[in-house]
Amino acid sequence: MYVKPRAGALVRDPETMKPVPAKGRDVPRSSYWLRRLQAGELEQAQKPKRRQAGASKKED
């Protein structure tokens, strides 16, 4: 599942001890992450769409 921290929250991954980035990341659906969601420290989010390889920004 893809999650991101709520504004002002610092949630660490219990395996790496690194904080979940503000843009969010995939995490396993485990009791730890479900508890963080229920506590309001995280919110489920949409995974950002990846840009296709070879796609470039439109230049004016």
Image: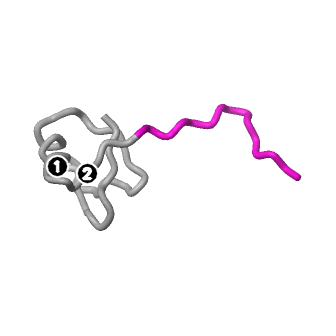
Amino acid, disc 1 = Arg
Residue that appears at 88% across and 52% down = 60
**Mark 2: which secondary structure?**
strand
Q: Main secondary structure of the magenta part?
A: loop
Residue 34, position as x, y percentages in the image: 16, 40
Alpha-carbon span between mark 1 and mark 2:
6 Å
Q: Residue at x 76, y 41 (%)?
A: 56
Q: Callout 1: helix, strand or loop?
A: helix
Sequence-wise, which precedes: disc 1 or disc 2?
A: 1
Res 31 → quadrant: top left
Task: In the displayed orientation, state which residue is furthest to the bottom.
Answer: 8
Residue 56 forms part of the magenta stretch: yes
Q: Which mark is residue 36?
A: 1
Q: Residue at x 26, y 63 (%)?
A: 9
Q: Which residue is mark 2?
A: 42
Q: Neighbour class for label 1 at 10 Å: few (<14), some, many (≥20)?
A: some
Q: Please provide percent x and percent y for residue 57.
A: 76, 46
